[in-house]
Each structure stands twice: as structure tokens, then as C-alpha cells.
Image: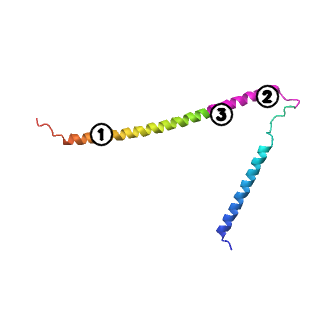
Amino acid sequence: MQTSTSKRRALYHKHIAFYRNKNYENLQTACINPPYRLTYQHFSIYSQRMENELNALEGKVALLIQVSGKLRAENHKLRQELAHALSSNRQYSDKMDSAKARLEKLLITLPEDQT
């Protein structure tokens, strides 16, 4: 006899398998069906001007996506450069602190002038 925890676990896995199969079927159907068009081009009231405006808008959106991708890549590169610069700055600061401590130690060991 299964415990309530193992029953819940079995039910959970059954649901996961069902949804995975359902999503896979939807993906297969989406790949087989032709793309859906919002405007039927052979309609008697169809406007070529509207088609031109939609094509212009599509071009602008494609350009926006392209520029966005370039900016994203540049932003990633700049973030890496900033991280490297901050790391270098931290190392140089540590070296300065170390040099300062050594100089202070040397100043303590020097004899004072007796004038």
C-alpha cells in the first residue's frame, strides 16, 4: 500500500508527463500548419497602402530588434570591462595599503634626529 506522499509524488509525475506531451503536440502542430495571416490579401476592400505601411512597420521592428541585440551585446561587454576594472582597482588599492604599512613600519624603526 502506497503512502500519501508517494501517491502525491506519482500523481505529480503523471501530471508533468501529461503537460510535456501536450506541449510537444502543440509544437508539432505549430510547425506543420502554415503561418496565420491577419489580413486576407484577396479581399475586395484590401488596401495596398495598408500593406505598404505594415511592411514599413515590419522593417522598423526588425531594425529595432537588430539594434537592441547590438546594444545588449555592447552592454554585456561593458559590464565585463567594468568588472575587470573594479578588480584591478581593488588589487592596486591593496598594493597601496601594503606599501603604506611597510613605509610606516620603516619610519618607526628609523632613529629620530637628536637636535
The residue range painted magenta reads 43-68
Q: Is residue 11 above or below residue 57?
A: below
Please give the name of the residue rendered at 77% of the width and 45% of the height, measured from the top-left corner.
30
Q: Which mark is residue 51?
A: 2
Instruction: Indicate the amino acid at tag 2.
Output: Glu
Q: Secondary structure at mark 2?
A: helix
Please give the name of the residue rendered at 76% of the width and 29% of the height, measured from the top-left corner.
54
Question: Between tags 1 and 2, which lies in front?
Answer: 1
Q: x, y (%) of residue 21? A: 74, 54
Instruction: Indicate the amino acid at tag 3.
Output: Ile
Q: Secondary structure at mark 1?
A: helix
Read off the residue under disc 3. 65
**Quadrant of the rendering where the C terminus is positioned:** top left
The local crowd at label 3, few if under 14, some if 14 to 19, many if 20 or more residues have their Cα within 10 Å, is few
Q: Is residue 110 above or below residue 18?
A: above
Please give the name of the residue rendered at 62% of the width and 33% of the height, measured from the top-left corner.
68
Which quarter of the picture shows residue 47?
top right
Q: x, y (%) of residue 93? A: 36, 39
Question: Between tags 3 and 2, which lies in front?
Answer: 3
Mark 1 or mark 3, earlier in chain: 3
Q: Secondary structure at mark 3?
A: helix
Please give the name of the residue rendered at 40% of the width and 37% of the height, measured from the top-left corner.
89
The local crowd at label 2, few if under 14, some if 14 to 19, many if 20 or more residues have their Cα within 10 Å, is few
Q: Which mark is residue 99?
A: 1
